Amino acid sequence: MWVPVVSSTGKPLMPCHPARARELVRKGKAVRRFNRGIFYIQLTEREGGETQMVAVGIDPGSKKEGFTVKSEKHTFLNINADAVSWVAKNMQIRRDMRRGRRSRNSPYRSARRNRKCGRLPPSTSARWDWKFRVARWLNTLYPVSVFVVEDVKARTTRRRRWNAAFSPLEWGKSAFYESIRTLARVSIISGWKTKEIRDSLGLRKTKNKLDDVFDAHCVDSWVLASTEVGGTVPDNTRLLLVSPLRFHRRQLHVTQPAKGGVRKSYGGTRSLGFKRGSLVKHVRHGFAYVGGTMNGRITLHSIADGSRISRTVKPKDCLFFAYSSWRAHLMPLVAKGAVA
């Protein structure tokens, strides 16, 4: 995996080989840095440098998504990201809870007009905003010249083609294209064209779209990026798994009452001084991210799969490293001859 490089002023430069990065750090010409799952170095003596054309291919999906950063000769990074898929259900629960409070003796605000009319639905906005956040993150580490996005289209109903323009999917992708153009040039390619190029290169795509393998989504994002910078064979198929963290915002009370009809308060984004999702290092459990809190203790979760490591951790035993709203885990290398 190639190491991103930024100048002393924070300008992204061309990535380098890990051995070269270690040499620069050893000679004092660079310092180690870490940005939400990606290790990079920052030069101490250079403010700029020549860069080559770097493309980022984006393969949108409903459950999983692929991102590839590559130049003409090298594939710098492949990201297999989980999509944001829980917002619609949360909005329905919030609406039902609010309506329930109005029918019983409980504090509630008066009904407002339907604020969703004429606006992008929250679930659609969250999905496409997540793609933009990942693209903006990559743009701070690599000298991105162009974003290549596979175009997705809404299905029409009742044989009326004009109603696709009113689909939230069309609204969402239009807003995404407008936002991402503020970072770099954008190239849009249809799905049938992506398949045509993939078949011409002899690459295959698995039917198991939920698998964390290169052939699931990153093969298409690699093909998309190659349309701008070239390339015939992927030289790097290692994946960085990225998953957005689900934060439960502070609510008036939980959905179901406890014993005695008491509804406890629920949610929040702070845990005893730590912002939830923060990357910390524990003296015993190592690197993890902060979850909830209970009885003066905080919970720690695994960066690899999000499972809970411990729920009785003292805050003073944790060393804070960085804020984060997602977790990133680099897949291990597969030995030659082994089955992935």
Image (spheres, rainbow, N blue to C red):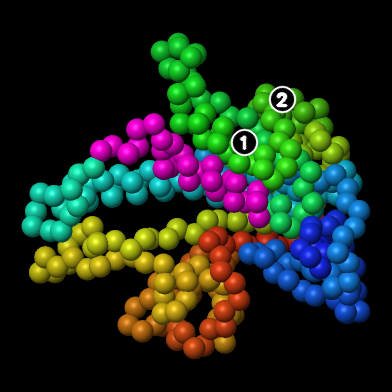
**In terms of secondary structure, where does tag 2 sit?**
helix
Q: Which residue is denoted by mark 1 in the rendering?
A: 177
Of pointers 2 and 1, the one earlier in the residue sequence: 1
Quadrant assignment, res 271 = bottom left
Query: What residue appears at the point 79 percent right and 51 percent down from the top-left corner?
Result: 143
Residue 210 inside the magenta-drawn segment: no
Q: Position of residue 205 (x, y in %)?
A: 68, 36
Query: What residue appears at the point 11 percent right and 65 percent down from the top-left corner?
Result: 261
Q: Looking at the image, is 121 positioned above or below residue 340?
A: above
Amino acid type indicated by mark 2: Lys
Query: What residue appears at the point 70 percent right and 28 percent down from the top-left corner?
Result: 189
If the image is split into quadrants, where does the N terminus sit? bottom right
Q: Which residues are magenta?
A: 113-137
Q: Residues within 10 Å of mark 1 (few under 14, many from 20)?
A: some
Residues at circles 2 and 1 in contact by the CB criterion of under 8 Å = no
Q: Which residue is denoted by mark 2 in the rendering?
A: 193
How far apart marks 2 and 1 lie (CA) works out to 19 Å
